[in-house]
Amino acid sequence: DAGVTQSPTHLIKTRGQQVTLRCSPKSGHDTVSWYQQALGQGPQFIFQYYEEEERQRGNFPDRFSGHQFPNYSSELNVNALLLGDSALYLCASSFGQGRVEQYFGPGTRLTVT
Amino acid sequence: TQLLEQSPQFLSIQEGENLTVYCNSSSVFSSLQWYRQEPGEGPVLLVTVVTGGEVKKLKRLTFQFGDARKDSSLHITAAQPGDTGLYLCAGERYSSASKIIFGSGTRLSIRP
């Protein structure tokens, strides 16, 4: 039973560039949430996708956008990267939009220089 | 404003000792989850509590949800080096059922 997978593992970008991160949910799950985790902090909710639409959004600017595909996989896009965007980006999957339990992937470590 | 406060932030104890970490809020949550995260990895779900006053046990770990659904505790008995990690609590708010709020975590180190 494949768990949540994310790619790439690590990424280094320059300020002003754009980045795309990818996530495949756990088998049987249809909902994907994205989180940003700065060093020494807990994860901060970015947004959630269900049925290919953004359903909930945290306090993040429009530079952060996403997409969900028919196979439930998802992408997180960040435009005009800032140094402060450096963080571990986590994807979590679950079954159903109103679900309680979610399972996290290993994350993508993004460094912006 | 940090909606979920975890304490202590750091804890280093000897193997075999007992410990309790706390997760407190002024907000009411429909459910609360505890995760453990190791360096370079995503959080791993340990338990979900949904009923006020609920107690759940997972081997040497005991989790309790406060009666008013505003706080929770995690108690570890006879800690082992394998318990080392970052422990995160996360609450699901009634007003936004799909939005989970995480605490900043308790970093636990168990010395052999």
Image: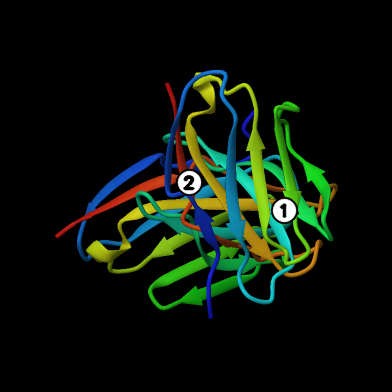
Residue B98 makes an appearance in the image = no
Residue plotted at (70% across, 40% down): B26
For disc 1, the neighbor class at 10 Å (few under 14, some 14 to 19, many from 20) is: many
**Above or below A12: residue A9:** below
Tell me which amino acid carries mark 1.
Glu
Residue plotted at (48% across, 46% down): A108
> Where does label 1 land, which residue?
B92
Frontmost residue, B83 versus A71:
A71
**Above or below A42: residue B82:** below
Does residue B34 appear left or right of residue A62 in this picture?
left
The picture places residue A33, in percent across and down from the top left corner, at 68, 52
Q: Are marks 2 and 1 on the same chain?
A: no
The chain that hosts pointer 2 is: A
> Where does label 2 land, which residue?
A108
Tell me which amino acid carries mark 2.
Thr
Residue plotted at (56% across, 73% down): B56
**Above or below A72: residue B12:** above
Q: Residue furthest left?
A: B112
For disc 2, the neighbor class at 10 Å (few under 14, some 14 to 19, many from 20) is: many
Does residue B10 appear left or right of residue B93 in this picture?
left
Q: Quadrant of residue B31?
A: bottom right
The chain that hosts pointer 1 is: B
The picture places residue B68, in percent across and down from the top left corner, at 73, 55
Q: Quadrant of residue A101?
A: bottom right
- Closer to the observer: label 2 or label 1? 2
